[in-house]
Image: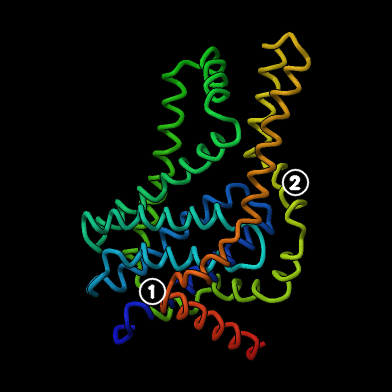
Amino acid sequence: MSNQSDSRITGVYAGILSLVEIGLGGFLHGMKVPLAGTFLSLNQGVFLTRVVKLNHAREGAKTLAFRVSNITALLKSLSPAGKKLLPMLAISAQGFLFSVGTLLLGPNLPGCLLGSILSSLWGVIQPLAVLWMVYGISLGEDQLQKILSVFSPEILTNMVVVLTFLKALVAGGLTWTTWKAPFDEQDLLNQKLLKWGLKGLPKDSATQSQRNPALGAFHDLKRPLFLIPFFLTGVFFYFAEDSNAQFIWKSLRPVAVAYLFFLAIRLFPVESWIKKWGLGGTALASALEFIEGKSNDNEASD
């Protein structure tokens, strides 16, 4: 791709990453693998490391990871199935954090190591932010005080630090291994995950998109990210409140907030905004052209 424009290169890489996300995401969710989001986050770091290494001598290499991630996030908004807003936010934020490393240390191994470690932190930040939006800061403080009555602040701090350190260590290790491994452009185009992503594009996605967003939001309420804090909230208020009415109100309030939040994620008109404002420019057009071309090639081979 050395003789192609920056926007063309950005678009092609974003097209590859979006298809890989579809392929890996479909496999992980299909197999009911826990922490699927963590695997997708780590995969993005590995892919961006490959992109930076292949283009480290190119002008603009320091910000290439951020540009690729932004176009990938825009492509996610155009997906006909599933939630869009949170995955878009995660892809874009992780790309930005990765680029902080390459901006500070350069498009090299140290820059990618720092970027991947910073990017891995978003997996800790985003779930906490979602829980704060659903349960509110005052309720979170009440829960924290009750948790602190069982666990000391030192133990809680150590647990968070250890888990964050382990994820950062894994992200850094994958980046190191990826940078040292031999690969070329063709390896990116021939990877099996890309083919899985192409298989996930046709009719199955269109069928899933017909699911009522309201029913989809109810489905989201069954996720552990919501159920565990909700269960703890109910337990805390059951023992803390004398009034059954207060207990019911404070327990059901997070359910209502969570449902509206999940519904907004599914109904948020991101794709119409992108088309109206012309976001992505020629890079997005190149990404869509790449995906369409690969999809046609895949259908022809089948």
Residue, disc 2 = 218
> Where residue 42 sits in the image (x, y, percent)?
46, 55
> Where residue 129 sits in the image (x, y, percent)?
50, 39
Residue with the most extreme front position: 276
Look at label 2 and name its amino acid.
Phe
> Where residue 232 sits in the image (x, y, percent)?
66, 25
What's the residue at 45%, 68% (across, down)? 71
* Cα separation between marks 2 and 1: 37 Å
Q: Is residue 20 above or below residue 87?
A: below
Mark 1 falls on what kind of element?
helix
Look at label 1 and name its amino acid.
Thr
Residue with the most extreme bottom position: 300
Q: Nearer the viewer, residue 171 or 144?
A: 144
Say left or right for 39 vs 253.
left
- Where residue 207 sits, quadrant-wise, is bottom right
Given this view, does label 2 or label 1 mark the residue nearer the observer? 2
Q: Is residue 177 above or below residue 61?
A: above
Q: Nearer the viewer, residue 211 or 40?
A: 211
Q: Which corner quadrant holds the C terminus?
A: bottom right
Q: Nearer the viewer, residue 285 or 44?
A: 285
Residue, disc 1 = 10
